[in-house]
Image (cartoon, rainbow, N blue to C red):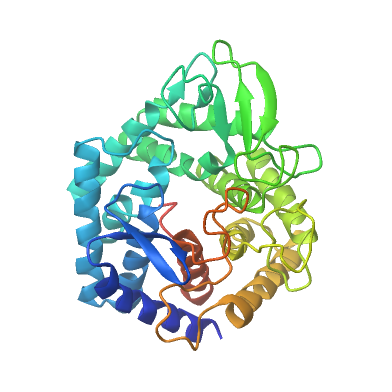
Amino acid sequence: MYNEALEDAIAKTKRNIGRFGKRFPHVSNDGVYELNDNTDWTNGFWSGMLWLSYEHTKDEAFRNAALDTVESFRDRLDNRLHLDHHDIGFLYSLSSKAKWMIERDEQAKRMTIEAADVLMKRWRAEGRYLQAWGAKGDADNGGRIIVDCMMNLPLLYWAFEKTGNEEYKKVAIQHADKSRRFLIRGDDSSYHTFYFNPADGEAIRGGTAQGYMDGSTWTRGQAWAIYGFALSYRYTGNQLYLETAKRTAVYFIEHLPEDQVAYWDFDAPVTAETKRDSSASAIVACGLLEIIGHLESSDPLLVYFQDAVHRTMRSLIERYSTIGQADAQGLLEHGSYSVRGGASPDDFMIWGDYYYMEALMRLQNGHKGYWYE
């Protein structure tokens, strides 16, 4: 089942090279991907899919297309285009860092370290966090973090390992600690965002940008927490991060509907019209596989998490994938970008496609993705 699904995903990715050219897919409307000129936070996922496909097939068509994306990221970095946010890890881990990991290209390594330096400019020493959005001192976002940033921290851990500069790791750990304390609630659910006083880092309140309401649990945010804390554990060995990943994963699994694929928010009223987010479940599949790799055989959660991965992946393949739709542009249907904002609430999401492919690669051959080296 997994091999068939992976081969279908790779075949669709190859067809999309011709469709997309040198542009980048973001989200779809009515099954057609919106394309941009490397201006969005999501562009690394297409690069990552090309590199995964190349590693699996050794087909030069994938490599050539992936190299084109890395050149685009070089230009984006040189000109500081659309980098005024914290999602630098999403962009450069899956593009230039992937190239370094596969080809040991020194220019790609230096480029990725430069990207880490851009992310470091988001560090607010007074408040001890990486600011998610906006310029320093921004009235609305100056004191704001979001849970998504847990997936950007691996870029900083990696930069420390490659340079020996302790500041990268120090910043990543302080942000992870603050996220663990304030974004993860006592019942192991998560806030999407949290606000602090920029002057001293004192807590103000939790909130959301895309969830059902401030106190609800946006499922993609919970997914970022699961995978992000698992990766922070891989880099640091801090057991608190692994425990947080495990607890947030149990919460996610226990709140899934019968078909094992999440609704867009765990607290949204469920009706026949309630939107799913297949991308959240794809992210969690990768996060669970990461957690499983760190568990002892005696851990009582090992079999529980293994069963959860297979139930979720079977459901994604059988009910949400585009297997059998040869001309489909995306791999997973019923992803949601922003249900609350009415932006692609039930469509293809390029990150959903990426994590679905990463999960299949992990299940087939133990591939770890490009978040850790």
Whole-percent x, y for residue 165 in the image: 35, 28
Q: Is residue 81 left or right of residue 302?
A: left
Question: In which quadrant of the rendered view does residue 11 lie?
Answer: bottom left
Q: Which residue is pictured at 32% across the width and 31% down the height?
A: 117
Work out whether residue 91 can be spotted: yes
Q: Is residue 273 above or below residue 213?
A: below
Q: Is residue 118 left or right of residue 139?
A: left
Q: Position of residue 143 (x, y in %)?
A: 55, 22
Q: Nearer the viewer, residue 40 or 178?
A: 40
Left or right, 61 with respect to 48, comes to left
Could you tell me residue 166's position as x and y percent? 40, 27
Q: Is residue 166 visible?
A: no
What residue lies at 40% left-to-right and 47% top-to-bottom?
41
Name which residue lies at 52% across and 66% down.
347
The part of the image, by quadrant, that contains residue 112 is: top left
User: Which is nearer the eye, 86 or 38?
Assistant: 38
Name the spot of residue 341 as percent of width and height, x first: 58, 48
- The part of the image, by quadrant, that contains residue 269 is bottom right
Q: How many circles with numbers are drawn on the protein?
A: 0
**Left or right relative to 162: residue 107:** left
